[in-house]
Image (tube, rainbow, N blue to C red):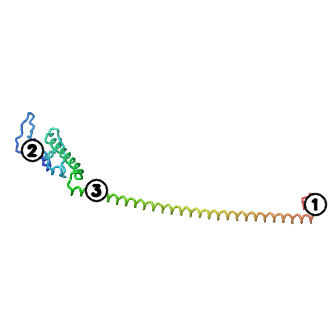
Amino acid sequence: MKLPAITIASTPVCIPRDTTPVQQSRRMMVTPLTFPIISDSARLRTSTQIIPRLNPLHPPMVHKRTVSLETPAVHHHNHQRALILQRREHYRYHQVWRKPFYGTTTEREEYRKELREQLKRQMEEKCVALKLQLACKVKEAEYVQKVDCLALSSDREQRIQHGKAMTAYRDENKRLMEQSWRDRALTRSQEAMKERELLCLNPINWSGTLK
């Protein structure tokens, strides 16, 4: 079995195609491998090229996945990839604080300028956030004031309606009482008239009920 060549710009894995396979006892083809060497150049550390991670059980250019395809080349590729990523991260981390302490005058001035710009940007963002917060508070206060005015007007309207209802209730009670008084007076006058008529018909009030 031949493992196809894996071409990666930063960590190439060179597998020669013209090498004669070695015959094993189980008739498995083993290809001699040439492991690459990681360079310490700054280009490799600062490169932004993405290095893919290979699956040891499923190498490239092989459609069927099997354990017999697990070879040292793929593991070596993944190990080299991990080392390159670690070196990149180490280089990036140390490049952050190298300029303000060990850089040239221009680099240190650029670093200070960047810090000043960041501080100005943060101050502007904070001012904008405070303005937005104040605007939100003003809107909230206006909304609360409107709600309070509506509540006060509603209470005043309710008091007016209640006063009108109580006035109508009082007037109706007064009318009913006056009507009752008039009815009583009319009834008494009618009874008195009837009694006078009875006295005219029978002057002797034997029962003593007539007045």
Q: Depth check: give the residue in front, 78 or 203.
A: 78
Frontmost of labels 3 and 2 is 3
Residue sitting nearer the eye, 152 or 193: 152
Task: Give the residue number, with chain letter if any, for mark 1.
Answer: 205
Q: Secondary structure at mark 3?
A: helix
Q: 186 left or right of 136?
A: right
**Where residue 15 is drawn, which disc sits there?**
2
Q: Earlier in the sequence, mark 1 or mark 2?
A: 2
Q: Is residue 103 visible?
A: yes
Q: Is residue 52 above or below residue 160?
A: above
- Distance from disc 1 to disc 3, alpha carbons, whole Å, reads 126 Å
Question: In the rendered view, does 176 fall on the left or right side of 7?
Answer: right
User: Label 2 amino acid?
Assistant: Ile
Residue at 15% in and 50% down: 42
Q: Which residue is mark 3?
A: 115
At which x and y percent is residue 190?
84, 65
Disc 1 marks a residue whose amino acid type is Asn
Please tell me which residue lies in front, 3 or 197. 3
Say the numbered circle drawn on residue 71: none
Of label 3 and label 2, which has the lower sequence position?
2
Tell us which disc is closer to us: 1 or 3: 3
